[in-house]
């Protein structure tokens, strides 16, 4: 799994940081900060949930072997 974020579309809702704090944080303006682009197996479900909850769709996930 590989995670990318598009900070230009982030609206600062913070759902990502709430459900996957090991993977996402927010800067001083509330914009998403990616902490780990290739999470361990145990964090993959949280990453998918964060992407699904993002109202701006700023989080993209590519499964292994995809780009």
Image (cartoon, rainbow, N blue to C red):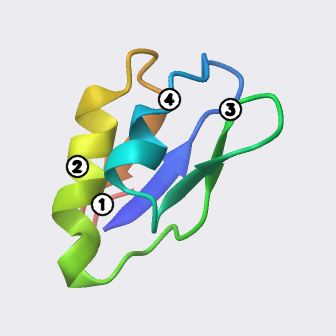
Q: On residue 7, which mark appears?
A: 3
Label 4 – label 3 distance at C-alpha? 7 Å
Identify the secondary structure beneath mark 3. Answer: loop
Count of numbered labels shown in the rendering = 4
Label 3 – label 2 distance at C-alpha? 18 Å
Give whichever of discs 4 and 3 has the lower sequence position: 3
Q: Which residue is mark 1?
A: 66
Q: Which residue is mark 2?
A: 48
Give whichever of discs 4 and 1 has the lower sequence position: 4
Label 4 – label 1 distance at C-alpha? 18 Å
Q: Residues within 10 Å of mark 3 (few under 14, many from 20)?
A: some
Identify the secondary structure beneath mark 1. Answer: loop
Q: Quadrant of the N terminus?
A: bottom left
Q: Nearer the viewer, mark 4 or mark 1?
A: 4
Q: On residue 58, which mark appears?
A: 4
In this view, the residue in front, 32 or 9, is 32
Label 3 – label 1 distance at C-alpha? 22 Å
Residue at the location (44% across, 57% down)? 3
Q: Quadrant of residue 9?
A: top right
- Is disc 4 in contact with disc 3, using a CB cutoff of under 8 Å? yes
């Amino acid at each position: 799994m590989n995670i990318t974020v598009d900070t230009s579309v982030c609206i600062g809702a913070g759902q990502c940081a709430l459900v996957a704090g090991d993977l996402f944080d927010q800067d001083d303006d509330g914009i998403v900060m990616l902490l780990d682009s290739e999470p361990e197996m145990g964090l993959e479900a949280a990453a998918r949930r964060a992407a699904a909850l993002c109202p701006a769709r700023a989080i993209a996930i590519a499964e292994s072997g995809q780009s």
